[in-house]
Image (spheres, rainbow, N blue to C red):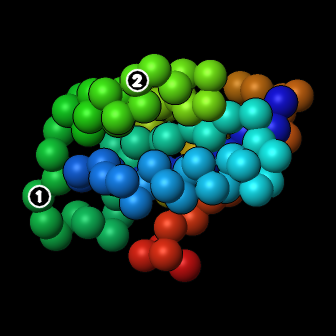
Amino acid sequence: MRIGVFGGTFDPVHYGHLIVAEQAREQAGLDQVWFVVSARPPHKADRPVSPFDRRAEMLALAVAGHEDRFRVETIENDRPGLSFTADTLDALAQAHPNTEWFLILGADSV
């Protein structure tokens, strides 16, 4: 499987997120894009963030009907400490060793 990892706070999810995910999936020939909800984003420690469950639910509603292309991944909620991309990618690689991973970044992260 070729999986794109699109991490973020998604507070709230919006069309821009969905467009980036779909374009990355199409242009890179990915099987799916996994939206990884950041549980404790270190760069937003000084401001309020909506509860994790609400953000994950918003994403699930946004991708409803397109589960063949998109998945909401909640691995961050189960991991302790701050949500760092390198740790997330490591955990995903360990959990799914036969997957080819592609990191997707939004313009705000680039």
Measuring 79% from the left and 54% from the top, which residue is drawn there?
Answer: 28
Mark 2 against mark 1, which lies toward the viewer? Answer: 2
Quarter-wise, where is residue 59 in the image? top left
Establish if 4 lies above or below 34. below
User: Dot 1 lies on which element?
Assistant: loop
Image location (x, y in percent) of residue 54: 20, 32
Image location (x, y in percent) of residue 19: 49, 55
Quadrant for the C terminus, please.
bottom right
Q: Which residue matches tag 2?
A: 64
Q: Which residue matches tag 1?
A: 48
User: Which amino acid type is marked by label 2?
Assistant: Ala
* Mark closest to the chain's N terminus, 2 or 1: 1
Establish if 81 lies above or below 79. below
Which one is nearer the viewer's eye here, 19 or 3? 19
How would you rate the neighbour count of disc 2 (Cα within 10 Å): few for under 14, some for 14-19, many for 20 or more? few
Measuring 52% from the left and 26% from the top, which residue is drawn there?
Answer: 66
Which one is nearer the viewer's eye here, 102 or 65? 65
Quadrant for the N terminus, please.
top right
Image location (x, y in percent) of residue 24: 67, 55
Quarter-wise, where is residue 27 in the image? bottom right
